[in-house]
Amino acid sequence: MKKLLILLTVLFITAPAYAQETINVNVKKEKSYSEVANEAATARAATAAAMSDASTTIKVPLAVDFKNYTHIAIVDVQNSAGRRAKRGFKMVNKGLLSSPLTIINPTSDKKKFKANSFYLRNTKDPKWLYLYYTGSRIGVDVSISIIIRDYENNIVYSATTLNVGFYEVMANIANF
């Protein structure tokens, strides 16, 4: 009996030492809103510093009077990936809203646009101008190319801009 008591005493004294487990806790700290905003601002500043200077190259200067025309048709809008999305047509339409000319957006007639997205190119009217827009990204630089044609497909105006804002480019077209 004495041995049993000694054995139980030893077990109760040493048991807690064997029962202890080591628990490792990894705490992941998320960044606060201000830290994320500061990092984003730093990234924007670095991108702006890497950009080339803003410039506009006019290949064909405007030789006609916009007062001789009544409409401007948005024929083609290509983004930097070479895609022709409805969103691009809507943005160009929005950029031209201050124009005195009536803007014709091909996406407004869904059936015709779905059948042939270039249907405005085939619609010839001597009172219309036809706009072609191409936007592209070259590294951190943004290039926008604008071509305006008349009904005989002659280039009336052509310009390429580098790192000039979209709405500034469109305002230059709308306010001729």
Image (tube, rainbow, N blue to C red):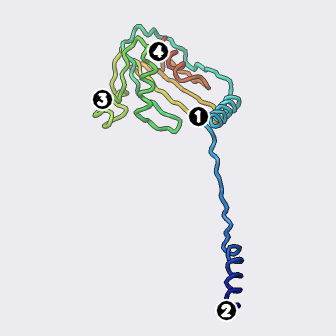
Amino acid, disc 3? Asp
Please report whichever mark, 2 or 1, sits nearer to the chain's N-terminal start.
2
The relative height of residue 2 versus residue 120 in the rendered view (above or below) is below
Q: Secondary structure at mark 2?
A: loop
* Disc on res. 137: 1
Counting from the top left corner in percent of width and height, residue 95 is at 46, 20
Q: Looking at the image, which is closer to me, 20 or 164?
A: 20
Q: Secondary structure at mark 4?
A: helix
Counting from the top left corner in percent of width and height, residue 169 is at 53, 20
Q: Secondary structure at mark 3?
A: loop
Please report whichever mark, 3 or 1, sits nearer to the chain's N-terminal start.
3
Residue density around tag 4, few if under 14, some if 14–19, many if 20 or more, within 10 Å: some
In the picture of the structure, the residue carrying the numbered disc 2 is: 1
Residue density around tag 1, few if under 14, some if 14–19, many if 20 or more, within 10 Å: some
Amino acid, disc 4? Ala
In the picture of the structure, the residue carrying the numbered disc 4 is: 174
**Distance from Cα at disc 4 to Cα at disc 1:** 23 Å
State left or right for residue 14 relative to residue 72. right
Write the residue at 49% across / 16% down. Answer: 173
